[in-house]
Image (cartoon, grey):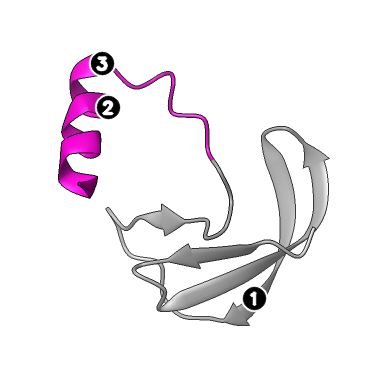
Amino acid sequence: MGTSLLVDDGLLELKVTEVKSPREVTVTVVHGGLVKARKGVNVPDVLIDCSALPAKVRTRVAHTLR
């Protein structure tokens, strides 16, 4: 709990206040706004398992980060 979720390149910020299940959380809005279509969600400082990504994508990401 307390994890920040950043939406639309950080224009909107949410804080996790409760974890209800592995797929559902309750959040508090820190910086609100309109959530538009096709906007990403970032979870800074959290390691996310990317093993479900295809090997080709993982290779491209690793190359990009070099």
**What separation in Å lies between label 3 and label 2 (alpha carbons)?**
5 Å
Q: Mark 2 highlights which residue?
A: 58
Q: Residues within 10 Å of mark 2 (few under 14, many from 20)?
A: some
- The residue tagged with tag 1: helix, strand or loop? strand
- Which is nearer the N-term, disc 3 or disc 1? 1
The stretch of residues the image draws in magenta is: 48-66
User: Looking at this view, is 40 or 36 the one in front?
Assistant: 40
| 6 sits to left or right of 14 | left
Q: Residues within 10 Å of mark 3 (few under 14, many from 20)?
A: few
What amino acid type should be assigned to the residue bearing mark 2? Answer: Arg
**What separation in Å lies between label 3 and label 1 (alpha carbons)?**
36 Å
- Label 2–label 1 contact, CB within 8 A: no
Q: Mark 3 highlights which residue?
A: 55
- Label 3–label 2 contact, CB within 8 A: yes
Question: Residue 51 location, x and y as percent?
Answer: 44, 20
Q: Nearer the viewer, mark 2 or mark 1?
A: 2
Q: Mark 1 highlights which residue?
A: 29
| 36 sits to left or right of 15 | left
What amino acid type should be assigned to the residue bearing mark 3? Answer: Ala
Question: Residue 33 location, x and y as percent?
Answer: 46, 80
- Label 3–label 1 contact, CB within 8 A: no
